[in-house]
C-alpha cells in the first residue's frame, strides 16, 4: 500500500510538472505571437496610412482612368505587404514549432496527446498517425499501449499525432500542423489586416 501511495504521488508530481510546462509553453507562445502581431499591425497600419495619404494626394490630380489603374496597383501592393507580414509572422512561429519538436516538452506533449486519444476514443486498438521519421512520437506512442497501430502520415509536416478508432467512426487531430493552421485562420480573420472595396 505504501509503495502504491509513493507511485501515486510520483505520477501526480510528474503530471503536475507536465501541466505546468504546458501552460508555460502556451503562455510564452501566445506572448510571442501577440507581440509579433501587435508590432506587425502597428508597422503595417503606419505604413499603410502614410502610403494612402501620399497616394490620395497624387490620385486627386489625375483623371478617372488613371485613378482606377493606380487604385488597382495600390491594392495589389497593400495585399502583397499584408501577405509578407503574415508570412513573416508565421515563418517565425513555424521555426519555433520545429524547435519545440526537438525538446523534452515535445515528448511530454505527445504523451499527453496519446493519453487523451486513448481516453476520448475509448479504444486500445486505435490507429495513430505521426509525421514520417518522428522517432520521438513513435517511441512515446508505442510505450503508451501495445495494441496501437502506428502509421506515418506524410500530410503531417511539423509534428504531433492524429488518431482514429478501430471502426473508423471517430477521428482526433492533435497535430501541431492543425493547431498552426487554426492559428493562421484566426489571424487572417482577426488581425485587422484586410482589404475592402
Image (tube, grey):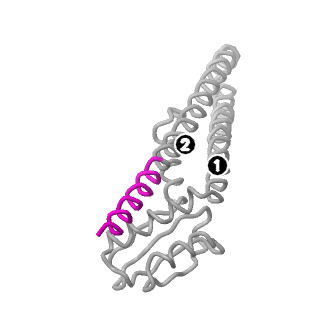
Q: Is residue 70 magenta?
A: no
Tell me the residue at 36%/69% (across/down).
3
Expressed as whole percent of the image width and height from the top left, the position of residue 196 reads 50, 34
Tell me the residue at 69%/16% (across/down).
54
Identify the main secondary structure in magenta.
helix
Find residue 169 and report its image quarter: bottom left
178 over 4 or under it: above or below: above
| Extent of the magenta region | 1-20
Location of the N terminus (image quadrant): bottom left
Find residue 136 and report its image quarter: bottom right
Provide the residue designation for mark 2.
Answer: 29
Expressed as whole percent of the image width and height from the top left, the position of residue 179 reads 49, 55
Residues under numbered marks 2 and 1 in contact, where contact means CB atoms less than 8 Å apart:
yes
- Which is more toward the observer, 166 or 81? 166
Tell me the residue at 58%/68% (across/down).
156
- Which is more toward the observer, 48 or 28? 28
- Which is more toward the observer, 124 or 39? 124
Provide the residue designation for mark 1.
Answer: 96
Q: Is residue 3 magenta?
A: yes
Amino acid at each position: 500500500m505504501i509503495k502504491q501511495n509513493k507511485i501515486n504521488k510520483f505520477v501526480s508530481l510528474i503530471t503536475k510538472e507536465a501541466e505546468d510546462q504546458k501552460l508555460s509553453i502556451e503562455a510564452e507562445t501566445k506572448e510571442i505571437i501577440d507581440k509579433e502581431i501587435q508590432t506587425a499591425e502597428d508597422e503595417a497600419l503606419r505604413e499603410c496610412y502614410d502610403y494612402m495619404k501620399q497616394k490620395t494626394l497624387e490620385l486627386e490630380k489625375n483623371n478617372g482612368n488613371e485613378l482606377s489603374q493606380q487604385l488597382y496597383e495600390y491594392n495589389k501592393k497593400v495585399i502583397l505587404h499584408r501577405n509578407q507580414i503574415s508570412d513573416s509572422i508565421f515563418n517565425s512561429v513555424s521555426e519555433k514549432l520545429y524547435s519545440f519538436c526537438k525538446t523534452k516538452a515535445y515528448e511530454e506533449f505527445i504523451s499527453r496527446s496519446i493519453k487523451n486519444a486513448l481516453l476520448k476514443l475509448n479504444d486500445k486498438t486505435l490507429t495513430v498517425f505521426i509525421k514520417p521519421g518522428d522517432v520521438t512520437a513513435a517511441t512515446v506512442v508505442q510505450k503508451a499501449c501495445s495494441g496501437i497501430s502506428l502509421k506515418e502520415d506524410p500530410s503531417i509536416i511539423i509534428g504531433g499525432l492524429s488518431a482514429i478508432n478501430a471502426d473508423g467512426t471517430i477521428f482526433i487531430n492533435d497535430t501541431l500542423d492543425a493547431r498552426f493552421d487554426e492559428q493562421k485562420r484566426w489571424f487572417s480573420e482577426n488581425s485587422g489586416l484586410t482589404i475592402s472595396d
